[in-house]
Image (cartoon, rainbow, N blue to C red):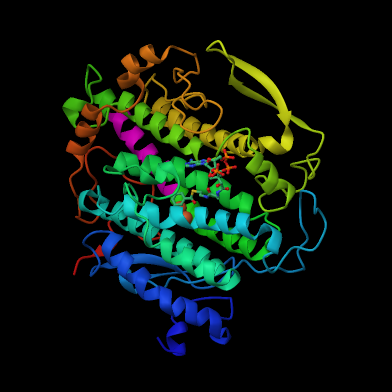
Amino acid sequence: MSISQFDSIPNNVDLNSDRKLQKALLRWQPNYLDWWHEMGPEGFQADNIYLRTAISVDAGGWAHYDYVKMPEYRWGIFLTPRATEQTIGFGDELGKPAWNEVPGEFRKELRRIIVTQGDTEPASVEQQRLLGQTAPSLYDLRNLFQVNVEEGRHLWAMVHLLHGYFGRDGREEAEDMLVRRSGNEDSPRILEAFNKPIEDWLSFFCFAMFTDRDGKYQLAALAESAFDPLARATQFMLTEEAFHLFVGETGVDRVVRRTAELMMQDPNGDVRKLGGIPLDIIQRYINEWYSASLDLFGGEDSSNAATYFATGLKGRYKETTKGRYADHVALGESYSLDRPDDKGGVMTEDIPMRRAMNAVLQDSYRSDCERALNRWNKSLAKAGCPERLSLPSPRFNRLQGVFMDFAALPDGTPITREEWESKRATFLPSEADRDYVKSLMTKVYEPGKMANWIAAPAKGVNGRPQDFEYVRFA
Ligand code: BYC
Ligand code: FE
Ligand code: FE
């Protein structure tokens, strides 16, 4: 790759004049492309997709839409610009200048955060690689690929930080990002939810709704970081993330609307006969992906979280937004945390606020999810359907945190493990549920047409009509 080829990497990090960074990226890029060909969307690599590419950091004109073959996508590197020198917004170093280099004493922690963040991005592409073959419409097919190429760019964003600020061990970590594989027994992705298979589109929409939304909250917490390059990189990632969340939230909503419509059509409300996804299956998918996504916040009572906050590595959601938090030091405050008691029940305990930072972030996330649930329930009401969907309790089905291995119903009521296991199929997807959902997944590639189990979107992409040819097959 010559320097002029670096011009094909849109960036605002002055790539053209940074020889060392060029060299590191030059060695990494072919491996990235090998990974993309092996683990990116299967099939479709030669097709022309109507995609958005980030080409600048202007709030108004950062994105460019055109047909592009995915392997030729211009994965760029962008940091949100700063108008003034940044100061640290929270923790023990509050008010001091933000760092433009990695402080030696926090190097290990910072690298770990960046690696954990970076690892999720290619993981999600791997999880979704077969979905194109069963897309319910060209519109959805294009949206899937949009999400996939942008997750690829998010990996680039983290690899840029590793190459640019961490030297040799950073380069090694960047290589390892392309070695781990979602679901692989010997070298899995780092966080659990990124090793779960996503084999149908209801799972995909739930993942984009709940798991990408964890991404939003983690990125927002990192956008407060005292390490300014990380703060600026994650801030820019959030602009793309908004679309992923849109795909998830409206995707589930379209399934719910179609289900409600079919329920009203059949005198017994039996949507299976009409080829729809029953509401109780949708509820079980919500239960599964919401609980798996809560695990991504880490423990609610966490010394890691306290350290990250104290040292300025990771803040709260909108930490520096005026009026949201009275105190950015968070010493001497406490948080009332629900946790299991020793008799199989639940008690409340006050813990130091800094130890509760993962719980605080989880709370912000939960209210955002509640808002989306309300929206889906409005769709049900509007269709005349009396049933409602709900968000399970944070005590339900947890593999991380204080309720790890605790047995509770989706409403939070503690039960015995035996009872939980015997009722499992009523609150989590069974094999039969998955098989039924999969049986509905057949590709619909005719412009403007939708699979029977999902409603059409409200509008097309970037002002294009619904029946636009979002994918041109080679
Ligand atoms: N799975 O103190 P604890 C996204 C480990 S998604 C496995 O409770 P901490 C995206 C933990 O490492 C956003 N292990 O938690 C979405 C620790 O290990 P050690 C991704 C876990 O450290 C869709 C121990 O348990 N970004 O962008 O405060 C598509 C105790 O940890 C898990 C980030 O996660 C788990 N779920 O918080 C594409 C941000 N949870 O120290 C992309 C960066 C905990 O005992 N990561 N452990 O060996 C972090 O800030 C933190 O690592 C976590 C964990 C929030 C994940
Ligand atoms: Fe991402
Ligand atoms: Fe995302």
Say which residue appears at 42% left-offset and 62% top-offset.
176
Say which residue appears at 68% left-offset and 21% top-offset.
349
Magenta-drawn segment: 246-261
Q: Which one is nearer the viewer's eye here, 127 or 204?
A: 127
Q: Which corner quadrant of the image does residue 305 belong to?
A: top right
Q: Residue 291 at x, y = what percent?
A: 45, 32
Dominant secondary structure of the residues highlighted in magenta in the image:
helix
As drawn, 432 above or below 110: above
259 in magenta: yes
As drawn, 134 above or below 150: above
Image position of 447 (left or right of 102):
left
Q: Which corner quadrant of the image does residue 410 belong to?
A: top left
- Which quarter of the rendering shows the C terminus? bottom left
Q: Which corner quadrant of the image does residue 35 belong to?
A: bottom left
Say which residue appears at 37% left-offset and 56% top-offset.
180
Q: Is residue 9 visible?
A: no
Q: Residue 213 at x, y = what percent?
A: 50, 44
Q: Which one is nearer the viewer's eye here, 5 or 44?
A: 5
Q: Residue 110 at x, y = what percent?
A: 61, 57
Total residue callouts: 0
Q: Is residue 256 visible?
A: yes
Image position of 241 (left or right of 49):
right
